[in-house]
């Protein structure tokens, strides 16, 4: 298996374990902002879900086709909608939906042939490989997981 693919799959598996570990967090901590004037733990986690879904439905199926990629959504709108939903759904539901969406992403990434990992594609004017694209999203995850750990004094 391609080492970069393996690295990303390990990140996704680790992210599931981390999110599942949040089951034990109190409701008060779950609804606590990660920093002053920032989203809560619930909102931060919930906003990752629609981006996994976007990648699996609007990016991966189209990356190596001849047609144009579907237009991406407005990030602020997606993020705000996800944060608003997080305010009214349970911790259990957010965690379950995150795990399901991440498992779908894992399955989709596993199915990508190794030879595709070196091919380039464009998003707008930016030339990327599959690894640079997905690794950028993994770094985004890690940034938010660090925020959550910090807010919860969580190791």
Image (cartoon, rainbow, N blue to C red):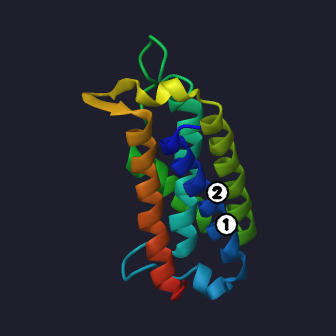
Residue at image location 59% in from the left, 54% down from the top: 10
Q: Which residue is mark 2?
A: 13
Viewed as shown, does residue 11 lie left or right of 102?
left
Q: Would residue 88 be seen by someone viewing this image from the given angle? A: no
Residue 104, image quadrant: top right
Q: Nearer the viewer, residue 9 or 127?
A: 9
Q: Furthest residue to the left?
A: 125
**Mark 1, other Cα within 10 Å: few <14 / some 14–19 / many ≥20:** few
- Which x, y percent locates residue 70? 46, 24
Residue 17, numbered label: 1
Viewed as shown, does residue 128 lie left or right of 26?
left
Instruction: Tell me the SS state at disc 1.
Output: helix
Q: Give the Cα separation between the discs numbered 2 and 1.
A: 6 Å
Residue at image location 65% in from the left, 61% down from the top: 16
Q: Would residue 51 be seen by someone viewing this image from the given angle? A: yes
- Asked if residue 59 is positioned above or below residue 52 in the image, the reply reads above
- Which x, y percent locates residue 86? 60, 64
């Amino acid at each position: 298996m391609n080492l970069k693919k393996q690295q990303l799959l390990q990140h996704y598996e680790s992210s599931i374990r981390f999110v599942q570990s949040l089951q034990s967090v109190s409701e008060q901590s779950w609804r606590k902002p990660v920093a002053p004037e920032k989203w809560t733990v619930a909102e931060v986690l919930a906003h990752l879900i629609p981006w996994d879904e976007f990648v699996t439905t609007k990016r991966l199926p189209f990356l190596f086709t001849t047609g144009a990629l579907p237009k991406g959504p407005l990030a602020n709108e997606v993020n705000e909608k996800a944060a608003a939903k997080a305010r009214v759904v349970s911790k259990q539901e957010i965690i379950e939906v995150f795990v399901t969406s991440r498992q779908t992403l894992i399955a989709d990434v596993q199915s990508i042939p190794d030879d595709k990992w070196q091919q380039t594609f464009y998003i707008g004017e930016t030339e990327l490989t599959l690894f640079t694209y997905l690794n950028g999203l993994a770094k985004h995850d890690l940034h938010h997981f660090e925020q959550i750990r910090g807010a919860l004094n969580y190791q």
